Image (tube, rainbow, N blue to C red):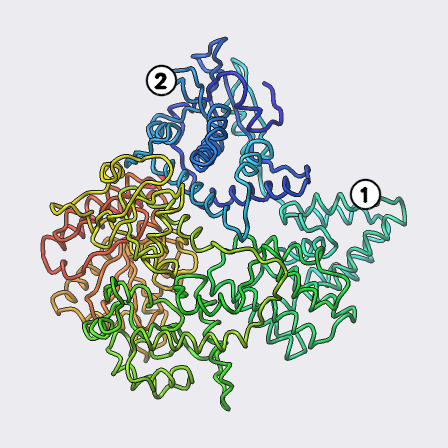
Amino acid sequence: MQAKETLFADLVQGRAQQFQVPLYQRTYSWSEKQLAQLWNDILEQAELLESGAMVNTHFLGPVVLAPSPQNEATFPRWLVVDGQQRLTTLSLALAAIRDHLVDGRPDEAERIDEEYLINKRKKGDDYFRLLPTQADRPQYAAHIRSVHSERSSGDRVAAAYRFFRRKLVEADDPAGVQDVLRIEQAITSRLTLVAVTAERGDNVHRIFESLNNTGLKLSQADLLRNYLFMRLPTRGEHVYETHWLPLQASLSNDELEQLMWLQLVLDGEDRVRRQDLYAAQQQRFERGRTEGAGAEADVESYIKELHRRSSLFRKLIHPAEETSPLVRGHLNRLHDWQAVVTYPALMLLLDRRGRGELDDRETARAMSYIESFLVRRTICRVPTNNLNRIFQSVPAQLPQDMPVADGLHQLLSADNRFWPDDEELRQKIRTAPFYQYGRPNQRRLVLQRLEESHEHPEPVDFGSAQLTVEHVMPQSPGGEWMRMLREDVAEDESPEDLHARLQHTLGNLTLTGVNSELSNHPFGRKQGLLQGSHLEMNRRIAATERWGAREILDRADELADRAVRLWPAPLSGVGRAERSRDWHLAHQVLAGLPHGTWTSYGDVAAFIGSGAQAVGSHLAKADGVANAYRVLNADGRVAEGFRWTGQDGGDVRARLSADGIHFTVTGAADPAQRLTSDDLALLLVGTEGEGESAVPGEAARDGAEPRGEETRAARFFRQLAADDTPATVSAVRELFTRWEKLGGWIGHGAGEVTTSAFLMLGNAGSPGRGIWPLTVYPGSGRGGVAEVVFQHLASREPFTDRSLRAELLGRLNELEGVSIPEGKLELRPSFRLSLLENDRDREALCETLGWFRDCWESRDAT
């Protein structure tokens, strides 16, 4: 047996060879969580390459190889006993890079293919440098050959490929642009593997077992603490009692590790990752190594400084400990924003204030720039992928020839920081779907600050007020709303398009504690409720005679005036780059369209905050936009002026058919396969940033609620009965009873406007830890629905197996009136609760739920 450290390029490059995954191995199983972690590691290595730093390669893990029984002297074949997930993922990432480059840089695409992915002169299975296990081969082969025909099996392979295609489009964003070839270099020459090569007769499975039996892993803080006190042979006890014990008592182990990392960053180490903390700090001590008492003094000085800074760090995680009301206000807002990424800059400001370099007022002014930077970028939908790098670099890059606050203002205004100016902020407040971007707490905080800017004599106690974000024009408008919208439509725009374009914009959003009363009612009824609100923004809405497009845009302009005053603008003339972020956002989501789905120009426009004509014009001119031909007119037809960009793609309808798009007898694409703007938002952000409708994070059983109050279950059925027939309500009650007999339980969300119900399995009363097939929602004016949570099931065993999710879809489609396309296995499609009035459908659904329960209970037996 031989073991050596190697790189992916060194492992797979060179003469023709093949790495075979044995048939007994499990299928490819990496989810988006593992892919996202790997992608972050790749980007970090690409940044190190760009900076010229050639240390700290990233260790990816072991690969255990054994000679294949089919081995030949002229064509070596290796069995992949361990490491197939890593090798498959890296190969798919390189295939995505190749396809990303193929239109603009075909020579580079061909080079990647021949160096890493294929054996050019071989035929059949020998053509592939990596040969996955048999169940994955059709999918993998399709992507290596650039013939992306999707099937039910092997979904994880297709999902991984789409993930990298989407991320490569995102990496091209000017707010954090990455050279794609630099990313390729990071994958092939900066990710290290330990290749364990067994010889005939070696017990490769025993090798695998020993490599994975790692025991309890010490944290970086544990490792560094042990190292520090090993270097304090005579002063250790004194330093421990005087400085370390108080430090350890004031912070958790995770917080202590974070502080240790921040201390490195404040000392100018702006490229160190937190997971490399121990090695980086050890190297700093070794570089300035002294012996004896001098060495102990260095370590003692480090621990004393760590102790001093711990009181500053606590103010970030416990803002109430800050004595200055001015500074405390900014710290509270940044804490509520969950702006952990800004800690290097905030620690620098508190540290400089502690050294007397700035006072409370200047500290608050500097923090206002940080707050504005975050808020303006969120409103303008600037991607967050480079925020870590921006704020981690602040201590090292802050100008030294001007006051600290002015230096920070200039630094954040610099090129490639993408701090939106007043003009862009005003435009995005009018057009961007604010409700679909950022986290729910961030959206609430923006509206809260806008309300506070009215400065009325009796300010609202937002800490105790149960306020949530409400759409004034509802997400599901009734007939009266649609008639009002029809009065405002422009040429070539339908009321539905106008609604999609404006519903999620900031001008249509407010804060209220009476969401359940507002619901989807006509504006006249909402006016009366808003008129009595203690919020000034609601009283102003109530004073408006109608609420259509003109009123929403007028309010957007008023909010923009306040936003410009609240959140300082960047400095001008610091070298700002031209923006094309919105198009990158569109490219990114189009690259991730699941097989068997299409979308419309209006849907894409509503998603990015643009106009349908602008989307059509852009796609007609832009080269290399993945899946651009799957953007159709709202009626499902190819636009009359459509033309291929770059290479001719042939007949559009034939390509759509090959991608799983079905056509009706009228020649239009199947409307059931259309992804709306809300679906597109789900594709891009998954569950992150979703509210109560996404995950039952606060689902509760009735027993958890105080006596004397309306239970969540009672509220759910009251809301259901308001819009559905007694027969539907009775059918839902029977469904819930049958589910409980199957061993499940019903959890209810905390929302008051719409109180959801989750059909849960797992520990009763432990929301988010079990599994749920359906979420049931009252209709709020349009009839209740059952949402099938395929998106969440994809990360929960055993339904990580796409074939099981596909079987669930097939069983549900047997219900009369349910026709969910396979392309929506990535999303959360729904069907009407009213169909449960049919005895046969209700029985079929209960049988399906029994099958679901059996699959879940047998998950450990496979």
Q: Amino acid at mark 1?
A: Arg
In front here: 353 or 541?
541
Q: Residue at x 58, y 43 (%)?
A: 216
Considering every residue shown, the one lying at the far left of the view is: 839
The picture quadrant where one finds residue 717 is bottom left
Q: Tag on residue 670?
A: none
SS at mark 1 in the image: helix
Q: Is residue 558 above or below residue 393?
A: below
The picture quadrant where one finds residue 677 is bottom left
Expressed as whole percent of the image width and height from the top left, the position of residue 18 reads 46, 19
Earlier along the polypeptide chain: callout 2 or callout 1? 2
Looking at the image, residue 266 sits to the left or right of residue 728; the answer is right
In front here: 669 or 63?
669
The picture quadrant where one finds residue 288 is top right
Q: Which residue is mark 2?
A: 124
Looking at the image, residue 159 sits to the left or right of residue 363; the answer is left
> 10 Å neighbourhood of mark 1: few (<14), some, or many (≥20)?
few
Expressed as whole percent of the image width and height from the top left, the position of residue 24 reads 38, 25
Quadrant where the image shows the C terminus:
top left
Quadrant where the image shows the N terminus:
top right
Considering every residue shown, the one lying at the far top of the view is: 73
Q: Residue at x 46, y 36 (%)?
A: 104
In front here: 51 or 157?
51
Q: Residue at x 48, y 28 (%)?
A: 107
SS at mark 2 in the image: helix
Q: Which residue is mark 1?
A: 287
Q: Is residue 559 above or below residue 317?
A: below
Expressed as whole percent of the image width and height from the top left, the position of residue 199 reads 54, 15
Mark 2 or mark 1, which is nearer to you?
2
Expressed as whole percent of the image width and height from the top left, the position of residue 41 reads 56, 42
Q: Amino acid at mark 2?
A: Gly
In front here: 654 or 149?
654
